[in-house]
Amino acid sequence: MRSSTALARARVILSAVALLGAFAGHAAAEDTAATGNAAATADLAAAAQNPIAAMVSLPFQNNTFFRTGPDNDTANVLNIQPVVPFNFGEWNVITRTIVPLIYLPSVTGSLPEVPSGGESGDHFGLGDINISAFLSPVSEGEFTWGVGPSLSLRTATTDRIGTQKWSAGPTAVGLVIDKPWVAGVLVRHLWSFAGKSDRQDVNQTLIQPFVNYNLPQGWYLVTSPIMTANWKADKDNALLVPVGGGFGRVFNVAGQAINANIQAYYNAVHPEFAPEASLRLQLTFLFPK
């Protein structure tokens, strides 16, 4: 029963996002044809795929996790991820915030970045908010980079959907824009420094390589798996390594620039009871200067 309920909830969320994307895509076809500005679309696509672009954006990233826990339940995480840049002469500071809304059925195992433990039962609520700030040079070259601190706040509304720890560490990103390619990697490591003493300390690495191949009319192919390593777990349960990818499109609807994509991943390596697969749907509102 719990598995059916979780799957039903996930289907509702996925259907809503899919309908929104379909509506936007239909509306975009006319808008793109009307503008016909292929060069501008290509530039916007490259900026949208750059995690440290000096551009305000508001992504909504929905992740549905399949075959999680001993009963193969379905879990869901909606990440709201505003990006706000600040310019200081020859340097930019790009802030990236991740606000996760998490649904976990009662018997699921751990999700990426959410260690197992805490209360039992179904849970839905706010997870741990993460804030990163990248110092990046203002550059027009093919290669760009950013480095800075990352802070994970103890904001989870229940024990089970958060670490119950305050954590911090370094983060860095480097990428090459050589059209039609945009490729790079984002790395982050967090250590806990405060929080509940009866919860496992945080010592976790996140690595996200990303490769985009841009096609005409704003379409693109993409792979951007999120790999994690929990150095506090035993070796059989430390790594999560997804394999997969998807496609997307950058377009305009009534003058609003939007980046939408869908990606599917199979977890080739994963901890016991962690998800075996995931589906990522992302809709990003872009606000270029």
Image: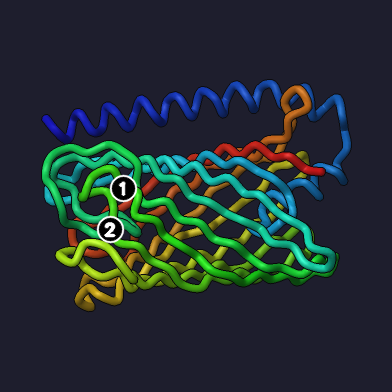
- Residue at the farthest front position: 194
Label 2 CA crowd tier, 10 Å (few <14, some 14–19, many 20+): many
Image quadrant containing the C terminus = top right
Q: Is residue 34 above or below residue 39?
A: above
**Which residue is the site of mark 2?**
163
Q: Nearer the viewer, residue 192 or 66?
A: 192
Q: Residue 165 carries which label?
A: none
**Residue sitting at 87 percent across and 46 percent down?**
39
Q: Is residue 275 above or below residue 64?
A: below
Identify residue type, mark 2: Thr
Identify residue type, mark 1: Ala
Image quadrant containing the N terminus = top left
**Which residue is the site of mark 1?**
156
Q: Which of marks 1 and 2 is nearer the N terminus?
A: 1
Q: Measured from the top left, where is residue 62 in percent x and y?
A: 44, 40
User: Answer yes or no: do the residues labelled 1 and 2 have beta carbons within 8 Å?
Assistant: yes
Q: Measured from the top left, where is residue 32 in percent x and y?
A: 79, 30
Label 1 CA crowd tier, 10 Å (few <14, some 14–19, many 20+): many
Q: Which of 172 and 69 is in front in this view?
A: 172
Q: Is mark 1 on a helix, strand or loop?
A: loop
Q: Measured from the top left, where is residue 59 in percent x and y?
A: 57, 42
Distance from the alpha carbon under mark 1 to that under mark 2: 8 Å
Q: In this view, does 248 lie to the left or right of 75?
A: right
**Residue sitting at 66 percent across and 48 percent down?**
220
Q: Measured from the top left, where is residue 239 in percent x and y?
A: 31, 70
Q: Is residue 14 left or right of residue 231?
A: right
